[in-house]
Amino acid sequence: MVKPKKLKPGSKIGIVSPSYWLDKDDLEKSAKYFSDAGYRLKLGRSNHIQYGPFAGTAQERADDINEMFSNPEIDAIFCARGGYGANKVLPLLDYENIRSNPKIFLGYSDITAYLTSITQKTDLVTFHGPMLYSFRKEFVQYNYDSMVNMLESSSKVTISAPEDFSPRILRPGICKGKIWGGNLTLITNRLGSSDALKTDDVILFLEDVDEYLYSFERMLVHLHNAGVLKKINGLIIGELHEFKDQDIPFGKSTDEIIMNVCGHLDIPIITNFPCGHGKYQCTIPISVHIAFVAVSFFGFNSCNSSIAFNPIGVAALPSPNIFAAIFSTMDPIAG
């Protein structure tokens, strides 16, 4: 495992657009939140190119990422937005350059493909979390705090959900393993390629946006049939944002679909976790060892106070109350 150096006040962050371009006004508005917080920003060339929906050709976008990693003045690399287009860029990345110049690399959605490929090929810990695109409409304090807490800390980090957000436990349990995952569509599409996600003994997290219920089931079944779920230690489903049904109802909720496909697995399963395309986006360190706890208690006060983590969510539901937590057992950042 290669840990990037932690973010500090005054660190210089390189901004790249590896897939789609971000509107200039949205880019400037979102960037201001970071500059006002004391970070120095350098906009990569991809932020100023529009090649159809893409922020430049595949080669131009790859060059931007490669140059940010090789530039000694850049301390971290944040993606402006996702979209589509990673699959053409990945073969053009200089992975040896990335391995030799380890830095924080942060994003989600289409950026899932970059996170998976970079970490599997270089062992560099990358981060699934909010991009500049996430702050274009509003500044969400939880997202910013989760990101800073993860990227500025060189000790163990607890990931907790906001008070008004309630993950749901579908199958209780406790497990440990390396955490991998991201966007379900991207992970499914990488199957059969050299960049396919390896999932033996991992805690897998999945999220997606704007999908039909039947499509969600189809992708989960495909992962199951491809053996992706066979040896995972735990399953975390993020917020499934803006999912939809057809005129003829599919007849199953997302939770029912998850349990129909994955319920036979003897592992803890939690859904509606604050990662993905919804309002709340925590930052998750890819490939880091974590402990994942999903336990139901008849009364929150019965929780063992010696457990060294914070609750992700305590739902205001009839008993049993829900108590769930995910926390890293290794520090994801170098001092």
Image (cartoon, rainbow, N blue to C red):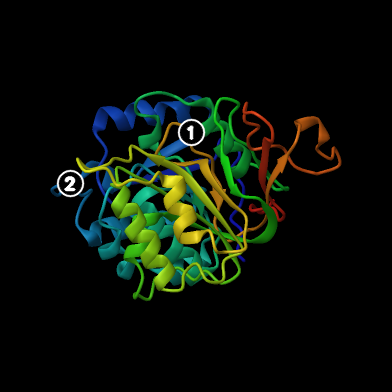
Q: Amino acid at mark 1?
A: Tyr
> As displayed, is residue 98 above or below residue 310?
below
Q: How far across and how far down the image is residue 269, in percent?
A: 58, 52
State how far apart marks 2 and 1 are (Cα): 26 Å
Q: Residue at x 54, y 43 (%)?
A: 283
Q: Residue at x 56, y 40 (%)?
A: 168
Q: Nearer the viewer, residue 108 or 298?
A: 298
Badge nearest the viewer, 2 or 1:
1
Q: Is residue 221 left or right of residue 144?
A: left
The answer to which quarter of the image holds residue 32 is: top left
Q: Residue at x 46, y 69 (%)?
A: 228
* SS at mark 2 in the image: loop
Q: How far across and how far down the image is residue 298, in percent?
A: 75, 36
- Label 1 sits on residue: 280
Dot 2, crowdedness within 10 Å: few (<14), some or many (≥20)?
Answer: some
Residue 53's label in the rendered image is 2
Q: How far across and how far down the image is residue 119, in percent?
A: 50, 64
Q: Nearer the viewer, residue 133 or 38?
A: 133
> As displayed, is residue 330 above or below residue 270?
below
> As displayed, is residue 218 above or below residue 138?
below
